[in-house]
């Protein structure tokens, strides 16, 4: 099974880009973030023509998550424990091939010390509590998504420039570590310990051409599941497409259990 995660940064704008990538790489599952569209307006037909069913949780202009799968999806669930109907659409889960898969879009945080930054830390804690309530670290669990945190210096093009700022702040690192302490493994780092392997580049100022990026998109998995991973990699190719997202996909190859 090939599983991918990708912050598509508006699926309606990027649908041709995403579908072209799906044709080329044929993942079995694609977790998407920042779809920025109401469910009724999601371009479901385009995915269905490629053999994918889609489960989505969207809102206009902001946020939004989805899972596209060529395999049957069961037990679709949306949101964190305690979310009301007006909550941001940042989490969707489904069981696919016996694996519980979550598409996760962590809040950006905007600026250290802001209400948005406090909300980001709170959201991560609520995600951990949701895992505690419904999942088991001894089970088959995968979280794919945009976590808006660079985990360590290898994941930031200029650590001293970012240190103490949003995406690379001590409080964010503590919140991410608490989530991982549920019993998760960073799939990419299980296979690649190199610095400079980024998944996001700012659109502005030629950041991609200078490779001034961050690794903020992850595939996390429980220990039992990571034993079935054969490789995890970042695909930079679609950053060169027309109308690219500012993020690129992260993929994992998973053997049958």
Image (cartoon, helix red, strand yellow):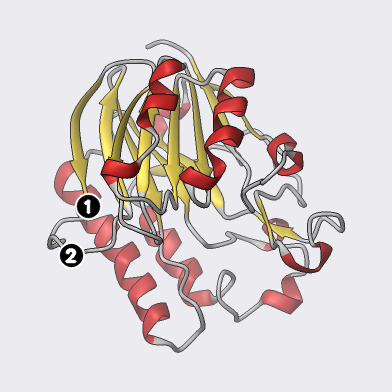
**Looking at the rendering, in which quadrant would you find the C terminus?**
top left
Which is nearer the eye, 232 or 109?
Answer: 109
Q: Is residue 72 left or right of residue 188?
A: left
Q: How far apart, in angstroms, are the residues tagged by discs 2 and 1?
A: 11 Å
- Quarter-of-image position of residue 82: bottom left
Residue 247 percent coordinates (x, y)? 61, 49
Foreground pick, 225 / 19: 19
Give the number of the disc on residue 120: none
Instruction: Name the quadrant containing residue 155.
Output: bottom right
Q: Is residue 181 above or below residue 224?
A: below
The residue beneath circle 1 is 79
Vertical placement of 170 versus 6: above or below?
below
Residue 125 lies, in percent from the top left, at 29, 65
Q: Is residue 37 left or right of residue 218?
A: left
Locate residue 6 relative to residue 54 in the image: left or right: right
Residue 133 picture location, percent across and down: 15, 49
N-terminal of the two: label 2 or label 1? 1
Label 2: how many Cα within 10 Å (few below 14, some 14–19, many 20+): few
Image point (76%, 51%), residue name? 195
Q: Residue at x 58, y 59 (%)?
A: 151
Q: Which residue is mark 2?
A: 86
């Amino acid at each position: 099974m090939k599983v991918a995660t990708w912050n598509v940064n508006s699926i309606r704008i990027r649908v041709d880009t995403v579908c072209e990538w799906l044709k080329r790489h044929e993942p079995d599952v694609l977790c998407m973030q920042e779809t920025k569209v109401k469910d009724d307006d999601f371009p479901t037909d385009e995915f269905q023509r490629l053999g994918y069913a889609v489960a989505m949780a969207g809102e206009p202009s902001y946020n939004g998550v989805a899972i596209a799968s060529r395999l049957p999806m069961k037990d679709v669930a949306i949101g964190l424990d305690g979310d009301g109907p007006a909550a941001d659409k940042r989490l969707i889960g489904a069981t696919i091939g016996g694996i519980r898969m979550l598409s996760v879009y962590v809040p950006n945080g905007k600026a250290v010390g802001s209400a948005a930054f406090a909300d980001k830390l709170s959201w991560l804690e609520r995600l951990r509590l949701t895992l505690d309530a419904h999942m088991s670290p001894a089970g088959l669990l995968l979280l794919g998504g945009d976590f808006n945190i660079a985990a360590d210096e290898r994941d930031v093009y200029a650590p001293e420039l970012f240190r103490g700022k949003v995406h690379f702040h001590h409080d964010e690192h503590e919140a991410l570590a608490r989530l991982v302490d549920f019993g998760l493994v960073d799939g990419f780092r299980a296979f690649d310990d190199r610095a400079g392997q980024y998944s996001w580049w700012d659109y502005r100022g030629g950041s991609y051409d200078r490779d001034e990026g961050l690794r903020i998109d992850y595939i996390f998995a429980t220990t039992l599941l990571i034993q079935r991973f054969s490789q995890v990699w970042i695909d930079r190719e679609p950053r060169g497409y027309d109308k690219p997202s500012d993020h690129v996909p992260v993929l994992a190859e998973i053997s049958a259990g």
